[in-house]
Image (spheres, rainbow, N blue to C red):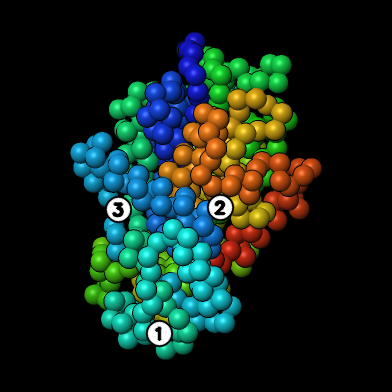
Amino acid sequence: MEDETEIVVVGGGVIGCAIAWRLAAERRSVLVLERNDVGSAASSRAAGLITPLRPSVAGNWFVRQTLDAFDQLSGILGEPVGFHRVGTVLVAASPDSERQLLAMTEAAVSGGPSYDWLDRMEAERRLPWLSASTVRRIAWVPEGGYIDPYLLTQAYGRAARAAGARIRTRVSASRLIVEDGRVRGVDTDQGRVACRNVVLAAGAWAGPLASAIGVPLGMAPVRSHYWITASNPLFDADQPVTLLPDAASYVRPEHDRLVIGAREGRSPSYDARSLPDDAGALPLGSEEERWIGLIERRDALLTFLPSLDELEMVHFIAGLSAYTPDGQQLIGPAPGVAGLYVAAGCCGMGIATSAGIARLIADMIAGRTPPVDPRPYRLDRFGAFDPYQPEFLERCAQSRTAKSGAGSGAAHRG
């Protein structure tokens, strides 16, 4: 496969397909390379939370772009993308989580989502499984909800193709070609693709490609997971997504079931160089390890979900999220390599921020001034480091462990 294009996007997950759509809509020549099938790796294992209330103005902007993209995609494709706008409830039951929640509502004043305060009785009416007796403050964000991340990835991909992008599956990028300080193409297992720009959007698999040309990416693959309960009359599809930072957990409906995400005290991290090409081949925990998060968060969760011990868990879903030490994404040009851009290290926010990331990358490639300050996402902000050193992997794992469900808007896996 000898080919040529203006821009190669490496990675056909939700971020790569969103970027391809945005670039193709601007009449750029775009080729997406995906080593397996579109949306088959980390994107397909996400819980798909769309939580618009974030701790910063920039965070709110990223999610707003994605919410707007749902309507745009529906218009292009002639059908809904499957967003369940059931709203989001944020529950604060401690002074610390209350302070975080108030800070988030303050950030929403500058163009953020609308919100309201709920009393305990109203919260329990909307969420029959919830016990709010210990709660200090409850926020209601009507724009929030959840989406099937695999279907969203497919929608981005279909829209990208409709705009002229090409997506090649079962093609593995093996090497970035750099000459005289500039990216010139990508070597694949099926030949070379010449190009002027490359966007690395391969999630946890992006690191080794970048490291091979002297661009270490400050992130590490970290396990994320959630459980799905059996059917229960307490649950229905119209109940809101609920963030429980004091239990390091979230809950969302899945028809007449619940999806429960509970962070373990120490999330395992992995050396990206050892990851298999197929995400399904990666063992992400023994039978015993699958229960660690629920066991560790059980007492805190029981405060809000008294029926927890009576619920039957019928599915356990685990995947990889690429986390950075500071919990911020890696978005922008690679230092020292003209034409190379990175969109990775999404820290469990990739689904909700996908269209915002795509907008930022498109603006950077076009030389436009981004609508948000890109400096917090710079690739070189960690100074000199080895992304495969055990201490660095641990810093990334701790970033997920320390993540606040309210402060972050919750991870898309949990």
Q: Position of residue 300 (x, y in %)?
A: 51, 79
Image mark for residue 83: 3
Under mark 1, the amino acid is Ala
Residue drawn at (41%, 52%), measured in percent from left and top? 64
Q: Secondary structure at mark 2?
A: loop
Q: CA distance from mark 3 to mark 2?
A: 21 Å
Residue ID for mark 2 = 347
Under mark 2, the amino acid is Cys
Residue at the right extreme of this rendering: 384
Answer with mark 3 or mark 2, whichever residue precedes in sequence: 3
Q: CA distance from mark 1 to mark 3?
A: 27 Å
Could you say which quadrant of the image residue 182 lies in?
top right
Residue ID for mark 1 = 132
Q: Are marks 3 and 2 in contact (CB under 8 Å)?
A: no
Under mark 3, the amino acid is Phe
Q: Position of residue 374 (x, y in %)?
A: 59, 44
